[in-house]
Every structure is written in structure tokens, then in C-alpha cells.
Amino acid sequence: MVSATAVFAALAAAVTLAVLAWVLWPLRGGRRWPWAGAVLVLAVGVLALYRLVGTPAALQETAGAAPQSLEQAVARLQAELERNPAQPEGWALLARSQAALGDPAAARDAYARAVQLAPDEPALLVDAAEARALADPQRRFDAQAIAWLQRAQELDPAASRATWFLGVAQRQAGEHAEAARTWESLLGSVDAATARSLRVQIDAARADAGLPPLPAGEAAPAAPASANALTVKVSLDPDFAERVRLRGDATVFVIARLPDGPPMPVAVERHALRDLPLQVVLDDADSPMPTQKLSALQEVEVLARVSADGSANRGEGDLESPAVRVALPAAGPVELVIGAGTDPAR
């Protein structure tokens, strides 16, 4: 008789392969054979590992009814977990799969089941907290998510993702000085490029708290542009500029963020309005989040924002360019025009 563990392992292997195929598909670049070869190599690796540590008969028995889609594989995994729920790795796999399918609420619930079974796994706690925020309409970290992040920090003081997200939660709660201090604790543990971009977020939080910017440190050498570097041209609509008077010392933020995701940028640069028109290159050095880099993304939304008070967060009276959705790597520069189609009397 086939054991429940063997069935679960076979289903997990099937879901893993389905997820890998789904993730690798955008990387095929129009060439079918390299993509197919990558999936085949991963499939052989999983099957070989399973033959070493699993029950080959169970895998062979389920192979004849292999799922035909990621949705079908996820449904089977979910059914198996309902029958045999004491599988934290299975619930985490289900959560990642649900997130890949665009169902953040289901991912949140699956991560919660995983945390119930493995409450002392820092990485799992952080993933579960992030999933709760992504499932919230305002992308906010609630009390449960914050408790998980704090627990992850207790278990692993070097958990930079937990520290970053705690700072985000403090910003959401209006605790700007506390958020700045939280993020400042990361400066000594990240690379120079990340530290430069992190300082942008720290200075924005300090400004909202009525504090001066961090003292200027020793300038780090410029890093070469990373993968998926994005060239952005920003200008002010001439007709709009003739009808309104904007302060030359107002701040312009050039922002790349996840489409339909949290409002925090994955890359941001700060410039003065008087510098327009300007051209910038957004890359990993401009990422304020140690865990989210442009080089790891396939698509971003790009916009430029004029902020009178110098805050990176959108405020009343701020002016934005229309957002542009860009597939990465971009084929050419992205052009943003601030004030295009805007009624200055609004």
C-alpha cells in the first residue's frame, strides 16, 4: 500500500515542476529548446533525488495521471494537504504556488497553516508576514504580521528582510523616526550600493519626522549598472509649465515599483525640479529594499513624482507623471512627462 508521505512527496514534486515551468517560461526568449531543456534538467534532477530518498513506485503510480497545468497540480496538492495537514513544507509550497497564480488571500492562509506547524522558522515567518501585507487592500502589515516579523528577528537578529519590513510597518503607522532608526540598523550589514539606496528611504523617513538627513558618509565608489538597468528620461510638460509656477527646489522622485503591488519602490532616485529635463539610470544600486532588486524582476511600473515637501510618500498636492508599465530588460529609454494632460486648476 502506498504511504501518504510518498503520495505527498510525489504531488509536491509535480507541483514543484509545474511551478518551475511556469517561472521559467518568460525566460525562454522566443527559443523553445533552451527553455524546454532547462525544465527537463530540473525534472531529471527532481526525479533522481526522489529515487534516492523517496518511494519510486508511488511516483510511477501517480505519473500516469500527471497534472496538466499548474492550477491542477496546486488543486491536487491542496487536497493532499487537507488529508495529511502536518506538512509545513507542503503548506509553504502551496502558498508560493498560490502567490504565483495571483491569489494573495489563498497564499496568506496557506502560509498561516505553515507557521502553525513551524513557528520557529525565521524565513517562513517573514514570508508569512509579507503574504499578509500583500493580501491586504492597502498592503499594510497588521498586528499578526508585525508579531511574526518581531519573532523572526528574535530567532535571527541578522534577518534583514524582517528588519526592512518592520520599518515599512512603522512608516505605515506614521512612526517615521522609529522607521528611520530601524532601517539605519541595516546600514552596517548591507553592501555599498544597497546602503546608498537605503539612505534615500531613511532620509525620507527622517524628513517626515522633522529630523535632518543622516550625516553624509564617505562616498562609495559607483557600481556598474546591474542587470535590468532602466534608463528613464523625465521632463516637464511645456504647456503645463507655462500655466503654473513650481518651486525650483521642489523634489522630483523617479520611481520604479511592482505593478499592482505594494507602493514601496524597488528603485528610486531623488533630484531637484530645476534639474529637469534629466536622464537617470535606475538599477540595483537604487533599490531601497535589500530583498527586492530590479535585476530579479520581469516587469515594473515607472513614474516621476514632484513633491513639495521632499517626502517620497505621495502627499496631497503632489504631481505625478502617468505611470508606464515596462517589461524588463527594457528595449530602450522610458520617457516620463510630468504634467501631461493635467489641469493646473484642479
Image: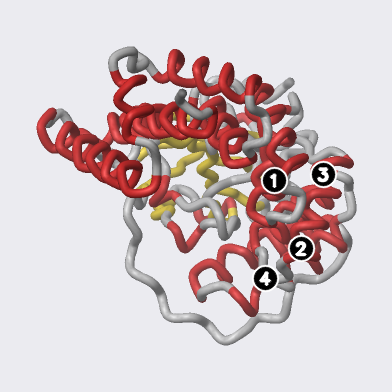
Colour scheme in use: secondary structure
Which residue bears the numbered disc 1?
307
Q: Nearer the viewer, mark 4 or mark 3?
A: 4
Secondary structure at badge 4 equals loop
Element carrying mark 2: helix
Pick whichever of labels 4 and 3 is earlier in the sequence. Answer: 4
Disc 1 secondary structure class: strand
Q: Which mark is residue 153?
A: 2
Q: Is residue 327 visible?
A: no
Label 2 amino acid? Answer: Gln
Cα distance, mark 4 to mark 3? 23 Å
**Amino acid under disc 4:** Ala
Q: Is residue 201 visible?
A: yes
**Toward the viewer: 69 or 84?**
84
Q: Are marks 1 and 4 in contact (CB under 8 Å)?
A: no
Q: Which residue is mark 3?
A: 172
| Secondary structure of residue under mark 3 | helix
Where is residue 229 drawn, in percent x and y? 35, 52
Query: Hey, what amino acid is under mark 1?
Result: Ser
Q: Looking at the image, tell me whether mark 2 or mark 4 is earlier in sequence order.
A: 2
- The answer to whether mark 4 and mark 3 are in CB contact below 8 A is no
The residue at the point 39 percent across, 48 percent down is 53
Q: Nearest to the eye among marks 3 and 1: give it.
A: 3
In this rendering, position of residue 68 left or right of residue 120: left
**Circles 2 and 3: CB atoms closer than 8 Å:** no
- Front residue (pair 124, 194): 124
Label 2 Cα neighbours within 10 Å, binned few <14 / some 14-19 / many ≥20: many
The residue identified by callout 4 is 158
- Sooner in the amino-acid sequence: mark 1 or mark 4: 4
